[in-house]
Amino acid sequence: MRILITGGAGFLGSHLCDRFLSEGHYVIAMDNLITGSVRNIEHLAGHERFRFIKQDVTEYLYIEGPLDAILHFASPASPIDYLQLPIQTLKVGALGTHKTLGLARAKGARFLLASTSEVYGDPEVHPQREDYWGHVNPIGPRGVYDEAKRFAEALTMAYHRYHGVETRIARIFNTYGPRMRLDDGRAVPNFIGQALRGEPLTVYGDGSQTRSFCFYSDLIEGIYLLLQSDYAEPVNLGNPTEMRLLDFALLINELVGNKAGIVYKPLPADDPKRRRPDITRARQILGWEPKVGLEEGLRQTIAWFRQALKGSY
């Protein structure tokens, strides 16, 4: 296949490039590099089946030749990014999704949208199933990301129903692993970076809020299977093992050997109190579930961050 991956220089996008190239496909990565990094794909320079285009997907989009699939992963994805880039976040969710869906329609390509668990907002239903409509503050600070992805899902389904485009929607829950940015702002890079520097780990609120952490290789496998499936409605992809953020911080301190402890700061506005996917649909339709244990995944991620800190990745 010939595949376009928007956000292809990002954390997940770059791993997707690796996966599809390893399967023998031709990959075009597109990224404007506002949150992605060429370092994530520099190992692919000169690869005969890889091409990189530096471009904002909200602008006029032209790809010469056929395309079999488009994976739309372009977007700021961490709170620190989308709070600093609110307009760009809304534009890539709306205009970027419109441009890539239009391209998929013109090329007869299958389209996969990288959506997010944030479409559920601060959920009142637990765990979150795909038929739950969410509890989102549309004008809160996080709304720029939540609503961008909710609109992107609605637009994707409209192209599927009205234009007959083959579409897939992945609702991605917290994912971690190598190639995350040190200044990403999410729990894993924050905690690991602080622990490796011998600093106390910053926990917001009392740390009782929960998250579910999926190792990147499991997530990439789920995306790969979803693209090949015939299922058009949203599918949760994440790890159903729920953990308090305080316990997660303590685990990272233990794995790193950091004695600096924990400091507490006020909880940010609209921060979800519980987050855990119901992955029944993924199990039934894709035969997929995570395989990498949390400690195993964290040890690999910590080792990568040690090297990244030395090289100021």
Image: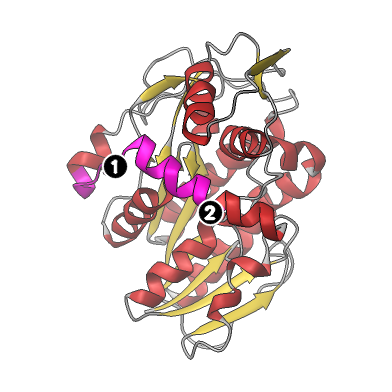
User: Would you place residue 202 above or below residue 34 in this image?
Assistant: above
Residue type at tag 2: Trp
Q: Secondary structure at mark 2?
A: helix
Q: Quadrant of residue 103?
A: bottom right
Q: Secondary structure at mark 1?
A: loop
Residue for point 72% across, 44% down: 183
Q: Is residue 229 visible?
A: yes
Amino acid on which the number 1 mark rests in the picture: Pro
What numbered label is drawn on residue 304?
Answer: 2
* Of the pair 173 and 164, the residue shown nearer to us: 173
Residue 290 located within the stretch drawn in magenta: yes
Q: Quick one: 156 or 181, which is closer to the camera?
A: 181
Q: Is residue 234 visible?
A: no
Residue 239 in which image quadrant = top left
* Residue 73 coordinates in the image, percent (x, y): 55, 56
**Pointer 2 local density, CA inside 10 Å: few below 14, some 14–19, many at least 20:** some
Position of the N terminus by quadrant: bottom left
Indicate the quadrant where residue 191 lies.
top right
Label 1 belongs to which residue?
290
Residue 256, percent across and down?
52, 35
Q: Residue 250: horizontal and vertical position, in percent?
A: 51, 21
Characterize the local packing of mark 1: few (<14), some (14-19) or many (20 or more) Cα atoms within 10 angstroms. many
Which percent across, then down, holds residue 177? Answer: 49, 48
What is the CA distance from the residue labelled 1 to the residue labelled 2? 21 Å
Image-based side of 20 in relation to 283, left or right: right
Magenta part of the chain: 285-304
